Amino acid sequence: MNKKFLVTGGTGFIGSAIVKSLIKTGYFVKVLDNQSRGSNRRLKEVEGRFEMIKGDIRNMNTVQRACKGIDSVIHLAYINGTEFFYTKPELVLEVGVKGMMNVLDACISNNIEEILLASSSEVYQTPAVIPTSETVPLTVPDPLNSRYSYGGGKIISELLTINYGRKYFRKAIIFRPHNVYGSDMGWEHVIPQLTLRVRKLVKDSKVINLPIQGTGKETRAFIYIDDFVTGFNKILQKGKHLEIYNIGVMEETSIQELILEIGKIYGIKIKIVPGKLTPGSTQRRCPDISKLKKLGFKPKFDLVMGLQETIQWYNDFAHLQFKND
Ligand SMILES: NC(=O)c1ccc[n+]([C@@H]2O[C@H](COP(=O)([O-])OP(=O)(O)OC[C@H]3O[C@@H](n4cnc5c(N)ncnc54)[C@H](O)[C@@H]3O)[C@@H](O)[C@H]2O)c1
């Protein structure tokens, strides 16, 4: 019960949910985050019950200090948000690769034998098989497309974790989240962006035209944050050394269906105006979660339930955009 965790990226969307869950279970938790996209408000309900280190994952001394006295590292610090993959690809890779190396080095010098790495569904890019299992090959379809900085950095992180893991760790595990959503999930993702745009257009009209990227037929499988944490906890408790687990749900939803659902919640009709898809975007994404199910995972939330909570949050707190405190 006295296990001590370091959560990097712990004030981020997923990190903060993991931190709260660990604290509620009774574990000691340290958080390392530079607050570039993190926010203290996400950890308000556990304020004073964890140790906070504000610092950069690229700084070796900071990571070494954060790892002192720790038994297990959950490594999530990374640059997320699709627009940054296009505008700051070199930074995405620097944070990904230097951060990963610093974490591994600090684990080794502090005798930490357990590490869990947050990878991503983006390592499959345009998967040849859907639903996509953990054995489907990872690809970088075009190194010249800056979008793949994100997936490429995750592939490198996975390779480092596996190969250092084999030599220096008792338990090194990779989990690949697939489109996690919920309240306060950040601003640069499809659900918040669509919600905020619809919210602006609503005003008095009961029917609105909504220009989008693509046709709306593209699909994703969205997992609600509470289900995500349940899945993550199964991996933490029962996951095996050098194993990789998808975390997600197997219900594929088209962007069109998602938009109609958002419209229903706002009580309006939305007419989709198709547009050009950003180069490198994937048409379909849906994980095969058989492996996680074998650990006992069963998602509870359907999209309608999760969306209601999420949209309510963005409706109430739209003014917090651009505020990181
Ligand atoms: N949200 C998803 O659906 C999803 C899907 C696949 C993978 N992931 C991965 O899960 C992890 C968490 O994602 P999230 O949605 O919570 O994103 P997030 O942006 O909310 O969290 C990432 C955190 O890392 C921190 N960070 C960024 N650069 C840093 C640096 N140089 N030093 C220290 N901290 C730094 C940010 O401030 C932020 O708090 C990431 O590794 C992400 O790639 C998320």
Image (cartoon, rainbow, N blue to C red):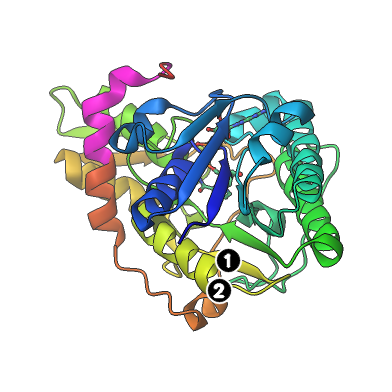
Inspect the magenta stretch and tell me whether residue 314 lies in it.
yes
Quarter of the view holding residue 246: bottom right
Left or right relative to 15: residue 64: right
Q: Which residues are magenta?
A: 311-322
Which residue shows up at 12% across the image and 23% down it?
204
Can residue 256 be seen in the rendering of this structure? Answer: yes
View quadrant of ligand 1: top right
Provide residue 69's location: percent of width, then percent of height. Answer: 63, 45
The answer to which of 158 and 173 lies nearer the viewer is 173
All told, the count of numbered labels is 2
Left or right relative to 287: residue 139: right
Q: Residue 246's mark?
A: 1
Categorize mark 1 by other alpha carbons within 10 Å: few (<14), some (14-19), many (20+): many
Vertical side of 185 occupied by 253: above or below: below
Provide residue 24's location: percent of width, then percent of height. Answer: 34, 52
The answer to which of 148 and 90 lies nearer the viewer is 90
Can residue 268 be seen in the rendering of this structure? Answer: no
**Disc 2 or 1, which lies upstream in sequence?**
1
Q: Measure the C-alpha gap from mark 2 to mark 1.
A: 7 Å
Marks 2 and 1: CB-CB under 8 Å? Answer: yes
